[in-house]
Image: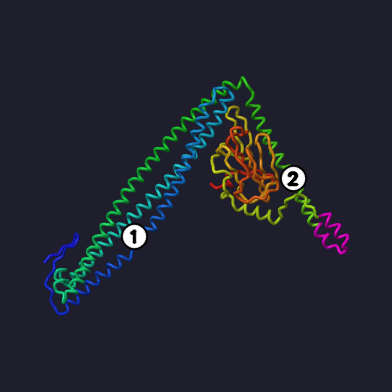
Amino acid sequence: MHVKIATYSFSHGAFTGIGWKNKLWKALWYSLVLLLMLNSSPLMGQTYEERRNAVLEKQSQTRSEIDELSSRIRAFEQQINATENEYSKVFQQYEQLNKMIALQDNKIRSLEGEQLHIQEEIDLIEEQIELRERELEKSLQNYRDILRYNYMNNRMSELELIVSAESMNQMIRRAYYLNKLESYKRDQRDEIVQKQLELSLMQSDLEGSLEKNSQVIDEIQQEKGKLNNQRSLQLRSAERLKEESSSLLDGLRQVQAQKENLENEFATLIAEEDRIRELENERLRRLEEARKIADAARRAEEVAKYSTPTRASYVSDETLKAYEQNFSVSKGKLPWPVSSTTVSKKFGITRNPLYGTRTEHPGINIVTREGEEVRVISDGYVFAVQPLPGYGNVVFVKHGSFYTVYGNLSEIYVNSSTILRAGTPIGKAGTNESEMGESIFFAVRKNNTNLNPEEWLTR
């Protein structure tokens, strides 16, 4: 007699010898034990879904950032197109193009990040496909093992097993378990094959998305090349006009003067801050000595003399050391003061494209949305708030021996001596009416040395 199960068949020979029924029952129980073992090994669907959802969430966040950059690029395009072809407007166009190219660089990086997320998802799906294939092979191998075991033990056919039952109840139970085993095998195989097909289709879709992203990056790089050409045209136009006006040279001198003014003002503010702290520390020392005077009248007089603080808010040396330590160990990990990470003017020496003159920029200019909220990047306190030519309204924050500067603010929320926690809003970024437009000036300093802010912010 020949019996066919799924895609496998075997021949049943004559059963001989005493105790063959025991062998049959052993084979049946072996099959049921395998069924239970298989049923106890989940496909890890929940873990896969959690990992998959995390990848999709990263893709969604990156796509939101890309959409935001695209929107701001379009805004700069509108500003460029609306600019008239006059000398001052030509240079303004050049500056807007610089910002636009910086945004496009950021967009390309974001798209590349999105590609990595999509590749991560593809890798995850391929991993799941391999898992399903192994599970399918394991199921088939178990199937072969059951058949081989039954054959080696002279297993009779399902029909013979049922017919040889000693009672109707035994016959029904045997038929039920045999049917259950075959049904489970068939359902499991179909489920794994279907899952493999679904994941293969998903992989195909994602590979298409990856290809589409590559095309988008190519298009943006081509557009960036066009913008570089436009910038060259603007520079040539400015060269033709520069003989008629010395305004840009005056502007360069003004920028240098503004930078020097910022440096001098900063040094003055630090010196004044140190002087006040010395006075306060001296007051506290004398107050402590006054409290130890034995004569009550003189003690009261001296305590009253030194009880008035040098200023309303005072941060202890211990707190300042904690601020400084926290800032120091956070290099490369500090949050950006605004949501944007697009830098339109970098730290250090810059060369003017028209005249070849070189100026030093003490911080960075970050492109922002109009009036975007600005937040302090680390614990500290405000030791000065004042306007400065070229930098608009400026907030100076002390973090021990480190300082941060937030300029071109259209609105300020804090006052001098305000104690701040990292992430506290201190004001709003510039608007179209601000000196630097829709951006902020940001600087980092250690004592009297300017540092490159980008080395301290999260990369």
* Quarter of the picture holding the N terminus: bottom left
Residue interval drawn in magenta: 286-306
Q: Which percent across, then down, holds residue 88?
A: 59, 25
Residue denoted by label 1:
43
The number of numbered discs placed on residues in the rendered structure image is 2
**Residue at 67% of width from left, 36% of height from top?**
259
Q: Is residue 144 visible?
A: no
Up the image or down, 91 lies above or below 370; here it is above
Task: Residue 409: name its quadrant.
Answer: top right
Q: Are marks 2 and 1 in contact (CB under 8 Å)?
A: no
Q: Count residues near mark 1 (Cα–Cα under 10 Å), then give few for <14, some for 14-19, many for 20+.
A: some
Main SS of residues in magenta:
helix
Q: On the picture, is 15 further left or further right than 202? A: left
As for residue 265 lying within the magenta part, the answer is no
In depth, the one of 334 and 449 nearer the eye is 334
Q: Is residue 276 above or below residue 171?
A: above
Residues 173 and 111: in front is 173
- Separation (CA) of disc 2 from disc 1: 67 Å
User: Where residue 233 sits in the image (x, y, percent)?
Assistant: 51, 25
Q: Residue at x 54, y 34 (%)?
A: 99
For residue 250, which quarter of the picture?
Answer: top right
Amino acid of disc 2: Ala
Of the image marks 2 and 1, the number of the one nearer the N terminus: 1
Identify which residue is drawn at 47% across, 33% down: 224
| Kind of element beneath mark 2 | helix
**Crowd rating for badge 2 (residues with CA inside 10 Å; few <14, some 14–19, many 20+):** some
- Check residue 271 in the rendering and tell me which mark sits there, or answer none: 2
